[in-house]
Amino acid sequence: MHYLRIAAVAMACTFAVGCSHFAGRRPLIGYTDKDHPHADTALVVCAEQEQYICGITGVNQVATWEKYNGGKTPWVRVLPGKQVIKLTLSNSHQLNRQQVTIDNVQAGHVYRIDVGFNGALLTGSYKDLGQMDSYTIHMPQFPFRPKAITASF
């Protein structure tokens, strides 16, 4: 019986690691029209910061919670116009949920969410990185090196 428990734990660990490797391979869709052309969208991405974790949990009323990595969705596609981005921000001591409003999202642009600490709470702000043909993020794959993943417009 003891070997069955060991096998079950080993399978659970393998499943968890496997799921984390599949999460975030493509930007999630932050709108309801799944057939909308990618050329007419923008990307909202969490900055790659060592001391903070950023997850995009929703865009307007569309949930972007990714079950495979515990809700730490690193990037989403959004439509042009006003977008309300819901975030989960954390570090080793705090967890904060907030939202950032981007008033004039433009197609082909990349908007980076930066996490900061104001002395009491974790805060999120965005920066328009401008128009780009593609954008690359580096997905952690513990214990392996991060993998570069690129999304194009």
Image (cartoon, rainbow, N blue to C red):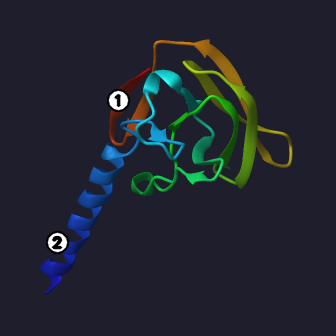
Judge by depth and name the residue closer to the eye, 144 or 23. 23
Amino acid tagged 2: Ala
Q: Position of residue 33 (x, y in %)?
A: 48, 43
Q: Position of residue 16 (x, y in %)?
A: 32, 58
Q: Is residue 7 left or right of residue 123?
A: left
Asked which secondary structure carries label 1, the reply is: strand
Quadrant holding the C terminus: top left
Amino acid tagged 1: Lys
Q: Is residue 112 visible?
A: yes
Q: Is residue 90 visible?
A: no
* 12 to 114, vertically: above or below: below
Q: Position of residue 31 (x, y in %)?
A: 54, 43
Q: CA distance from mark 2 to mark 1?
A: 29 Å
Quadrant holding the N terminus: bottom left
Q: Residue furthest bottom?
A: 1
Q: Position of residue 87 (x, y in %)?
A: 65, 47
Q: Please tell me which residue is depicted at 74% across the width and 50% down the height of the picture.
A: 98
Q: Is residue 71 left or right of residue 54?
A: left
Residue bearing mark 2? 7
Categorize mark 1 by other alpha carbons within 10 Å: few (<14), some (14-19), many (20+): some
Q: Please tell me which residue is depicted at 41% across the width and 34% down the height of the picture.
A: 139
Judge by depth and name the residue closer to the eye, 33 or 97. 33
Q: Is residue 3 left or right of residue 134?
A: left
Residue bearing mark 1? 147
Q: Quadrant of residue 127?
A: top right
Q: Please tell me which residue is depicted at 75% across the width and 38% down the height of the picture.
A: 101
Asked which secondary structure carries label 2, the reply is: helix
